Image: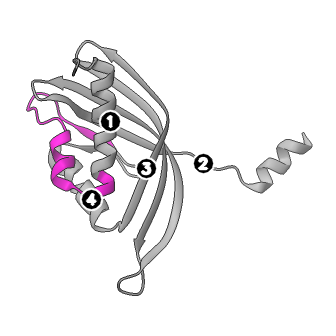
Amino acid sequence: MNRPRTDVEQIEHANTAFYEAMERGDFEGLSDLWLNDDDSEISCVHPGWPVLSGRGEVLRSYALIMANTDYIQFFLTDTKVTVADDTALVTCTENILSGGPAEEAGELGPLVGQLVVATNVFRRTPDGWKVWSHHGSPVLAESDEEEDDEASS
């Protein structure tokens, strides 16, 4: 028996679909997940990037990332969903494993791990929950020198 999913379950599903589309390099699927509403301009901040506003800028950024990333996988942790009427806020930690193009054809470039804290804002639409804004900030790792300083304090 299929029971209707709660708002939180629907939002968790939409959030997971967002990351899975990135992993597959599915630009069309990713585009469909973003809000397409003339009254609500979408925005995105990738780690280290300026604020991108509007469907054109935001979707171009994902096309660029997908074109230059041969492999990417997200392991989401610390996920929290908050719903207020037709708006939802998802915070999570993106544990990212990625690899770019290798120097030799047919090879995968070196894999790199990165931690990013993300905030994804969703809006309820007749077609389900859609991404309104994504903001990712890198988590800066402590250097050995900083750890030594703390240990000697």
Task: Report crowding for label 2: few under 14, some 14 to 19, many 20 or more residues within 10 A (C-alpha).
Answer: few
Q: Count numbered badges in the picture.
A: 4
Q: Amino acid at mark 4?
A: Gly
Report which residue position mark 4 lands on. Answer: 25
The part of the chain drawn in magenta is: 22-44
Of the residues shown, which amino acid type is indicated by label 3?
Phe
Q: Is residue 39 magenta?
A: yes
Q: Is residue 36 left or right of residue 53?
A: left
Dot 1: what SS? helix
Q: Are marks 2 and 4 in contact (CB under 8 Å)?
A: no
Give the x, y percent position of residue 152.
91, 44
Give the vertical position of 67 relative to 104 (above or below).
above
* Amino acid identity at mark 2: Leu
Dot 3 or dot 1: first in sequence order is 1
Q: Residues within 10 Å of mark 3 (few under 14, many from 20)?
A: some
* Disc 2 secondary structure class: loop
Front position in the image: 62 or 24 = 24
| Corner quadrant of residue 66 | bottom left
| Mark whose residue sits in front, 3 or 2 | 3
Q: Amino acid at mark 1?
A: Asn
Q: Quadrant of the N terminus?
A: top left
The earlier-in-sequence mark between 4 and 1 is: 1
Are the residues at dot 3 and dot 1 in contact (C-beta closer than 8 Å)?
no
Residue at the image point whose x is 22% and y is 48% from the top: 30
| Cα distance between the residues tagged 3 and 2 | 18 Å
Image marks 4 and 1: residues in contact by CB distance under 8 Å: no
**Label 4 crowding class (10 Å Cα cut-off): few <14, some 14-19, many 20+?**
many
Query: Could you tell which of marks 2 and 4 lies nearer the N-terminus?
Result: 4
Element class at badge 4: loop
Residue that mark 1 sits on = 15
Q: Do the residues bearing badges 3 and 2 touch, measured as CB atoms within 8 Å?
A: no
Q: Judge whether residue 51 can be spotted in this image.
A: no
